[in-house]
Image (spheres, rainbow, N blue to C red):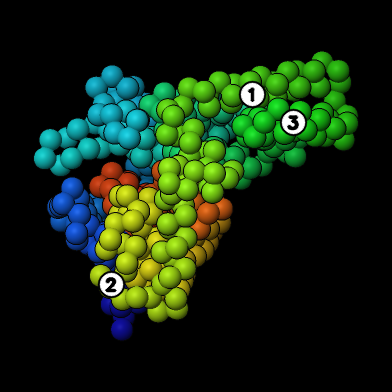
């Protein structure tokens, strides 16, 4: 009993066991969705291999001295930016995006996955410097520059889905640091106007009016107010330019989100079929390898972004609920560990990791059930993809590491 207590005190089983359950569901979903697909032959074996590698990596990261992450923050960020630049030059183009570096028999590696962690570490490192004041214009600009530089490189691929993950943790990190309401407004308003501009000119005008009205509440002088309005106008026009820059299939995905039925056999096809698959599963599902939508391959590459509908169809509402419960447990553990540590750097890193997982979960399941656009984001620990799985387990190893040494930082 004493040994078990010590083991539980060091390794957070409430963090590790739900992750193993997610990995098992993912392997089952990948096996089922690729069983009758000649082009996906070997995907299950690859995911099984990377699952083993990721677990080993988890325990390696778990065992490192916790201060290692502080020392590695800037080098990791620089290296990840170099990889993002390299992929633009020598990367493999898949589905309209040049986002993969080919690693021989191991397949492709997606630098954007590694860049998420590198950016979180770099932002946390900068924000915890004693000289940094999150309320100062200079430090806000530098913080945003650290976070948005990789976004610019990723948009050049182009990969808009991954960019949303960066926007999510950038916002959470500066909020957790203690930015004021006006500072938060300053950061959020350009994004609000940019998104509104994608829906049309009237939405764009309405968003600008709302932003201008908010300035009355903050009672800023004419120079500051004018600068903010100009920045928001620029964000709206920039978003429109970015939308034009996106590949046609990505534009179709956004348009199909607004009205999926407008192109039911094209851009809206996946979203419609995914809802059919989930709805047909009932409470207990049709059974493993017995899902019609899955086995007849109604949804292309269902083992990646739409794996949640495989689980919904074959394991039903119960299986889908187990997935959500596992994520909720993981999220609660990360937040608890992040809140309990007095080391600000570690707290920010863990909140960044939490946000990465949460945004992935929210968008992936959201696009599966039709409340989010189909923008190509995998479900952590479940969807097929070696890069995603390895990086997600690496980040979880950091969380487990902080839990292991928590008594040193409380």
Whichever of callouts 2 and 3 sits on the residue coming sooner in the sequence is 3
Q: Which mark is residue 24?
A: none
| Circles 2 and 3 in contact, beta carbons < 8 Å | no
> Please, which residue is most extreme toward the bottom here?
1
* Camera-side mark, 2 or 1: 2
Q: Position of residue 70 (x, y in %)?
A: 41, 39
Sequence-first disc among 3 and 1 = 3
The mark lying in front, picked from 3 and 1, is 3
Q: Which mark is residue 290?
A: 2
What element does badge 1 sit on?
A: helix
Q: Decide: few, some or many residues near mark 1? Use Cα within 10 Å; few <14, some 14-19, many ≥20.
A: many
Pointer 3: what residue?
Answer: 202
Residue 235, labelled with which disc?
Answer: 1
Residue 69 horizontal/vertical position (percent): 37, 42
The answer to whether 218 appears left or right of 72 in the picture is right
Identified at 63% across, 20% down, the residue is 237
Residue drawn at x 42%, y 50% is 270
Are the residues at dot 2 and dot 1 in contact (C-beta closer than 8 Å)? Answer: no
């Amino acid at each position: 009993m004493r040994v078990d207590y010590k083991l539980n005190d060091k390794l957070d089983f409430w963090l590790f066991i739900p992750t193993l359950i997610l990995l098992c569901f993912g392997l089952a979903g990948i096996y089922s969705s690729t069983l009758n697909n000649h082009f996906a032959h070997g995907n299950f074996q690859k995911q099984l291999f990377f699952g083993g590698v990721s677990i080993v990596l988890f325990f390696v990261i778990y065992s490192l001295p916790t201060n290692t992450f502080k020392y590695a923050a800037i080098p990791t960020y620089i290296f990840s930016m170099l990889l993002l630049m390299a992929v633009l030059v020598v990367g493999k183009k898949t589905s309209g995006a040049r986002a993969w570096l080919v690693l021989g028999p191991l397949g492709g590696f997606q630098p954007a996955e590694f860049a998420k962690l590198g950016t979180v570490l770099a932002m946390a490192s900068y924000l915890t410097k004693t000289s940094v004041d999150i309320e100062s214009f200079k430090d806000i600009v530098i913080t945003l520059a650290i976070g948005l530089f990789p976004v610019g490189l990723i948009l050049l691929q182009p990969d808009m889905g991954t960019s949303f993950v960066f926007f999510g943790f950038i916002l959470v990190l500066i909020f957790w640091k203690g930015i004021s309401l006006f500072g938060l407004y300053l950061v959020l308003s350009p994004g609000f106007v940019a998104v509104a501009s994608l829906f049309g000119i009237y939405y764009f005008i309405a968003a600008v009016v709302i932003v201008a009205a908010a300035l009355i509440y903050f009672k800023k002088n004419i120079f500051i107010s004018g600068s903010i309005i100009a920045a928001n106008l620029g964000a709206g026009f920039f978003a429109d330019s970015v939308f034009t820059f996106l590949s046609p299939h990505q534009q179709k995905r956004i348009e199909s989100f607004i009205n999926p039925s407008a192109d039911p056999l094209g851009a809206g096809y996946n979203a419609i079929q995914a809802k059919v698959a989930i709805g047909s599963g009932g409470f207990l599902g049709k059974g493993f390898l017995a899902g019609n939508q899955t086995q007849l391959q109604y949804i292309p590459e269902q083992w990646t972004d739409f794996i949640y509908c495989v689980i919904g169809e074959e394991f039903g509402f119960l299986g889908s609920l187990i997935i959500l419960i596992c994520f909720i447990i993981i999220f609660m553990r990360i937040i608890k560990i992040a809140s309990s540590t007095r080391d600000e750097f570690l707290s920010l890193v863990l909140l960044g990791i939490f946000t990465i997982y949460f945004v992935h979960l929210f968008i992936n399941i959201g696009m599966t059930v039709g409340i989010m656009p189909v923008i190509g984001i995998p479900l952590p620990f479940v969807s097929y993809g070696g890069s995603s799985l390895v990086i997600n387990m690496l980040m979880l190893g950091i969380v487990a590491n902080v839990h292991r040494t928590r008594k040193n930082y409380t």
